Image (cartoon, helix red, strand yellow):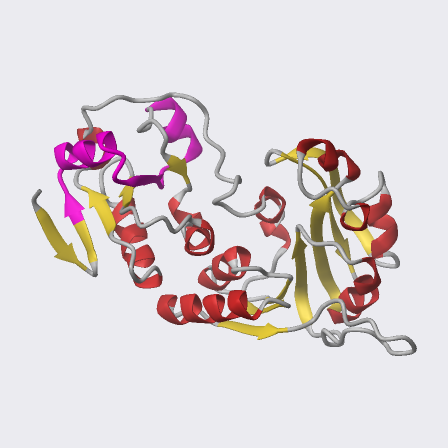
Amino acid sequence: MSARPHDSFKTIAPDDAGRLIAAGDARVLDVRSPEEFTTLGHIPGAILLPVELAPCAVATLPRDGRPLLVVCEHGIRSAHAAALLARALPGTEVLNMAGGMSCWRGPRDHAPGDPFGETGPSSWLVANADLLPRGASVLDVACGAGRHALLLAAAGFRVRAVDRDPAKIVFLQDAAARLVVPVEAAVVDLEADLPGAAGVDLGTAAFDLVLVVHYLHRPLFPALARAVKPGGLLLYETYTMDQAARGRPTNPDFLLQPGELPRLAAPLEILRRREGEFDGRMVAGIVARRA
């Protein structure tokens, strides 16, 4: 196999990529647009994640020891994504396919892809990105491994990310340092609601955007509202009761009742909302503004 070192990833020929794929020895990440993925066809089994969403992959891609093969149409966007992922994923061999899909002679699948599945960001965040002022300050609550924190920081936002899991915060801090993006990550017990106390302190009028995805702790809503600056936004999306029929979560403490989310966000003004099946999950989402 011919390979050329470049910024800690390797560029390989399409024939060599085909042999790796046929042997099951590589995971394929396609960084083209959803339209290219479907219309021009993709390598069967490829994960779709457009190049502008690639920072999410640092937090979401499975770590199974297999090399990561990054592809686009001509090998240019994939080289950019491969360099980013190689910096952020030590121990993972990252490969770029020379010439991209324009040189691929193997099988193609034309099934639609979903860039907002397990690997990508919440489509609710992306759909409402037009509301975010350039360089906004963001609080990512229950951030997990940081798929949204890394994406927003790479896009130029000033991000603070909090989660109760120290291992996830350490991972996020390391990933942000490798990507050289500004994420302030901290361990915070979001469910430390002490009787007679004000609850968790997330700041007062401190952030242009407070973001919560796939997390629900109802007593936290006053702290979320306090953390939003006047004129700022709360962007929230999580599971509804209908998700229980599809699998996890099933605990009603973590599932919204129909129409409940706007009530929880009061007195914030609801600008946008949705409820139903999105990204393969049963969820409800709002964008709410502090007057």
Residue 244 seen in render: yes
- 143 vs 33, left or right, is right
Q: Left or right of 67: which side holds 154? A: right
The N terminus: image quadrant: top left
Residue at position x 84%, y 63% in the image: 219
Q: In the drawing, does residue 104 fall left or right of residue 135?
A: left
203 drawn magenta: no
- Residue at (53, 61) in percent of width and height: 149
| Residue 26 image offset from top left, x and y in percent | 27, 40
User: Is 197 left, or right, of 61 in this rendering?
Assistant: right
Residue 272: x and y in percent read 74, 45
Residue lying at the far right of the rendered structure? 196
* Residue 291 visible at all: no
Task: Locate residue 12, reporting x and y percent.
Answer: 15, 43
Q: Is residue 215 above or below residue 17?
A: below
At horizontal 10% and vertical 48% (from top left) the residue drawn is 3
Up the image or down, 273 lies above or below 102; here it is below
The picture places residue 215, in percent across and down from the top left corner, at 69, 54
Which residue is pictured at 77% across the width and 72% down the height? 192
Magenta stretch in the rendered image = 11-40
Write down the quadrant of residue 274 in the picture.
Answer: top right
Q: Residue furthest left?
A: 2
38 drawn magenta = yes
Is residue 218 positioned above or below 180 on the image?
above
Indicate the quadrant containing the C terminus: top left, top right, bottom left or bottom right: bottom right
Depth check: 33 or 168 in front? 168
